Image: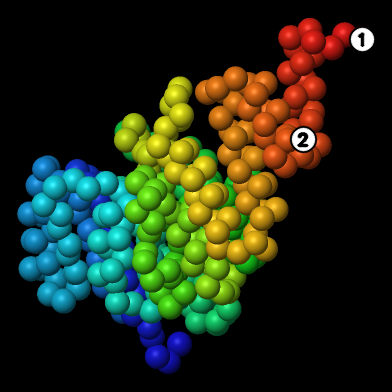
Amino acid sequence: MNDKPLVSVAIITYNQKEYLRECIESALAQDYPYFEIVVADDGSTDGTQDMLKEYDEKYPSKFVLRFSEKNQGITPNSNLAYFACSGKYIAWMGGDDLMLPGKIYTQVQFMEENPDCTICYHNLEVFDSYTGNFLYFFNAKRSYIGDVKTAIRHGSFNGACSNMVRSSKSPKNGFNILLPVASDWLYWVETLHNGGKICYIDVILGRYRKHNDNVTNKTKKINQNEIDHLNSCNIIMQLSPDYFSDVLNAYSNKILNLRYKVSYFRAVLTSLLISPNLKKIIRLFCYLISFGRFKF
């Protein structure tokens, strides 16, 4: 790479001071020198903003800081970071996640060598925040390479802090404010809708922290994260009629994922009616057998 492009490391955070320090240090330790660290803080009350000002003084011209006076939520804060980025590529990070050595260089090199790559993601090591113990690899069971239809059909298979995005393909309006919590899947889809592919590097280049405050934590009731994903399907449907069958498949799978929070029978049956396949038929059949609806 003769002309090394600028990378914007976009970090969104709220009341994560100590986690954020580790996140920033992992970025500063990267061997790729041409990057800025864009941090959007959503009105933290734990001293995060004072800490960020200290970093800004210590590393002149390295940081781009955006502070909210009051807490606005994940999507507005993501836009605060997004519109402050000036790099050719954006590397997205949560304030509690970590980069591993060589992450930025590896992804930039891949994207420079593959101009049709719009989003590049990699595997992640998921670890327990309280013990530091390894839990599992994010993409141990599935990873996909493809276009916008792949991103629609298979959902969020790309761990958020693993993504590097080509800025020129990102949606002009950023993250959709109609989705207050889980707007990232739609962001990936809209980015790929503008052209190019999502590509996977089968290397572990980051660590994803699991703790009680994760937005994706499972709950007994339907949460905003799940509602946003269902609403994303409606928005994606409007992008192009070519995505109709892929959106139905995604919607069906998201309904199926709610089977332990609502009526199991209704969730599986609804999912099956929206987008039938053999696996869903088997699920419904086993359910009916278990409750004695069918007898042999």
The spot of residue 83 in percent (x, y) is 28, 69
- The residue at which mark 1 appears reads as 296
Is residue 94 or residue 258 the one in the foreground? 258
Quadrant in which the N terminus appears: bottom left
Dot 1: within a 10 Å radius of its alpha carbon, few (fewer than 14), some, or many (20 or more) residues?
few
Q: Amino acid at mark 1?
A: Phe
Residue at image coords 38%, 59%: 175
- The residue at which mark 2 appears reads as 279
Looking at the image, residue 26 sits to the left or right of residue 159; the answer is: left
The furthest residue to the bottom: 2
The spot of residue 188 in percent (x, y) is 49, 61
**Inter-mark Cα distance, 2 to 1:** 21 Å
Residue at image coords 11%, 43%: 45
Q: Is residue 142 above or below residue 293?
A: below
Quadrant in which the C terminus appears: top right
Residue at image coords 58%, 74%: 196
User: Visible in this render: residue 17?
Assistant: no
Residue at image coords 55%, 49%: 233
